[in-house]
């Protein structure tokens, strides 16, 4: 069975660290961090060349102490290392001991005057040890100039614990906007446990590939701070995967009704319907607010009807191309008042955001509801600027889930899945190819299909987001994106992955 991947907040990391330090000699964790990071650096240098030059950036705190341990370990391994202390040297007892070890090694030390020479050197690797998870204000002065400089270089960057300037809890750049800057790494080795900020918002652009070095802490040290979040791995939804019985029929796999398709937007419910059919729903009906097409020539199994002729099934996806007409509002009101399991997307969310009565109806429903806003839709639902949503995506998703008594999929880089009890899962799959029209409709259709097959709402949301992103990743790996990737290309790859995973992990229901 797949294992869960825990994410810990800064506060949780601090509690774990304090529990571990109580039983360890001074400097133990810093030395372990330095050794683990040095091993990661050596792996990045392969194949190594005799003239390989490594630049280690040393900050003023304990992250700088970790960097000094890296410099000492690399020098001991025979690698040419330059340690740059651009401002103040780290002053803690552990960091001072690390400084002594590094100065006793073959590492060459430089200060801020060395900054202009950095672009002129052919660095094989840069180790970012400037600032860690304790950074609370925008990076400025010599440190900002240093980060701006290394971000222009072609060589790989290895970040220690977190890329300097990135918020470990939110994934935003500290002081976002003109006042914020963060290092862009190809790899981050993060210490003790993984952090949510490495996997959402700016985190994925800044952190690159993330590896975790637990620093040989005993499992009991983690008992004082159970993780409040997880990455979306197979462990989060594998128990819901199903193997189909031979003795089954289309009714065994549920019906999905897609409601949308106002004039000029027929493609949205068609995309959602195709995704629902190919994700396993037994029957899919596309209900159109505008005039319904006779059929979908590419997917004739999709039944197309005027919304007035749709008997709402146990699972309804409403919003793709819905519009904001009186007919759209009436369909949404009828849907919210039904006992159906709901997927609320796109225009359905905008109509709810503008109508307190609809908000109250939604919050009081007993049946499951999954809402899939992008940041602007989330901002409308919470009555706040979209910048506030992106400033703390996790907090925004939690607030939405509580306010609307629904499972929330806050879309974006590192989509956030939240439930009304405060559970959080961050999705690691997907890429910029998903930033194109129609991909949200496909996602809504996948969620609807899983609900129709009896999946619990929480697992259905997580699995659909994971499968949707994984399909985009497979297309990019095959050279078919991210540029020019289209929503309809995702659907057959979702079907293939769902079948493969069901055969591997599913149980007969």
Image (cartoon, rainbow, N blue to C red):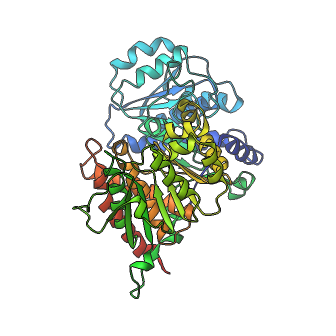
Q: Nearer the viewer, residue 124 or 243?
A: 243
Residue found at the far right of this picture: 22
Report the residue at 67% width, 51% height from top: 422
- Please say if 497 is above or below 360: below
Residue nearer the viewer, 338 or 221: 338
Q: Position of residue 108 (x, y in %)?
A: 47, 23
Q: Position of residue 134 (x, y in %)?
A: 65, 31
Q: Is any part of residue 7 visible from this angle?
A: yes
305 on left or right of 89: left
- How many numbered marks are there? 0
Place of residue 236 in the rendered image (x, y in percent of width and height, measured from the top left): 54, 62
The answer to which image quadrant residue 488 occupies is bottom left
Q: Is residue 151 left or right of residue 480?
A: right
Residue 289 located left or right of residue 39: left
Residue toward you, 226 or 430: 430
Task: Report the residue that reaches farthest toward the top.
Answer: 113
Where is 284 relative to 225, above or below? below
Measured along the vertical axis of the image, is residue 243 above or below residue 91? below
Q: Give the residue at x 72% y 57%.
A: 220
In the image, residue 9 sits, relative to residue 499, either above or below, namely: above
Question: Residue at 56% across / 39% down in the picture?
Answer: 354
């Amino acid at each position: 069975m797949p294992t869960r991947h825990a994410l810990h907040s800064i506060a949780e990391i601090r509690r774990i660290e304090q529990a571990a330090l109580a039983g360890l000699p001074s400097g133990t964790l810093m030395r372990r961090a330095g050794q683990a990071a040095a091993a990661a650096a050596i792996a990045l240098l392969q194949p190594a060349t005799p003239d390989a030059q490594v630049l280690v950036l040393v900050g003023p705190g304990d992250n700088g102490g970790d960097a000094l341990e890296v410099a000492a370990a690399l020098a001991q391994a025979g690698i040419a290392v330059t340690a740059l202390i651009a401002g103040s040297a780290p002053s803690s007892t552990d960091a001072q001991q690390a400084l002594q070890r590094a100065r006793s090694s073959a590492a060459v030390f430089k200060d801020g005057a060395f900054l202009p020479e950095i672009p002129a050197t052919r660095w094989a690797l840069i180790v970012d040890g400037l600032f860690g998870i304790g950074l609370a204000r925008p990076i400025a002065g010599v440190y900002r100039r240093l980060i701006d400089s290394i971000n222009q270089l072609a060589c790989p960057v290895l970040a220690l614990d977190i890329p300097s300037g990135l918020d470990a809890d939110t994934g935003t750049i500290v002081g976002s906007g003109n006042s914020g800057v963060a290092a862009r790494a190809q790899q981050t080795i993060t210490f003790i446990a993984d952090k949510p900020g490495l996997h959402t918002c700016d985190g994925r652009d800044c952190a690159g590939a993330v590896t975790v070095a637990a620093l040989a802490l005993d499992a009991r040290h983690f008992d004082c701070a159970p993780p409040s979040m997880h990455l979306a791995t197979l462990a989060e939804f594998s128990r819901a995967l199903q193997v189909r019985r031979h003795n089954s029929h289309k009714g065994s796999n549920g019906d999905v009704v897609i409601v949308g398709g106002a004039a000029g937007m027929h493609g949205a419910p068609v995309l959602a319907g195709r995704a629902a059919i190919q994700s396993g729903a037994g029957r899919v009906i596309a209900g159109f607010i505008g005039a319904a097409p006779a059929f979908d020539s590419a997917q004739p199994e999709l039944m197309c009807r005027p919304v007035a002729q749709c008997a709402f099934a146990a699972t309804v996806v409403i919003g793709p191309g819905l519009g904001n007409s009186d007919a759209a509002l009436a369909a949404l009101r009828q849907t919210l008042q039904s006992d159906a399991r709901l997927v609320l997307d796109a225009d359905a969310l905008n109509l709810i955001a503008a109508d307190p009565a609809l908000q109250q109806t939604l919050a009081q429903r007993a049946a499951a509801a999954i809402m899939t806003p992008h940041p602007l839709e989330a901002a409308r639902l919470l009555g706040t600027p979209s910048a506030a949503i992106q400033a703390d995506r996790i907090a925004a998703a939690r607030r939405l889930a509580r306010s609307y008594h629904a499972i929330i999929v806050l879309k974006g880089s590192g989509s956030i899945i939240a439930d009304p009890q405060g559970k959080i899962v961050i999705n690691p799959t997907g890429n910029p190819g998903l930033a194109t029209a129609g991909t949200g409709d496909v996602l809504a259709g996948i969620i609807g299909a899983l609900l129709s097959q009896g999946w619990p709402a929480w697992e259905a949301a997580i699995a659909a987001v994971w499968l949707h992103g994984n399909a985009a990743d497979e297309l990019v790996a095959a050279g078919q994106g991210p540029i020019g990737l289209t929503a309809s290309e995702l659907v057959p790859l979702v079907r293939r992955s769902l079948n493969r995973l069901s055969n591997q992990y599913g149980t007969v229901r």
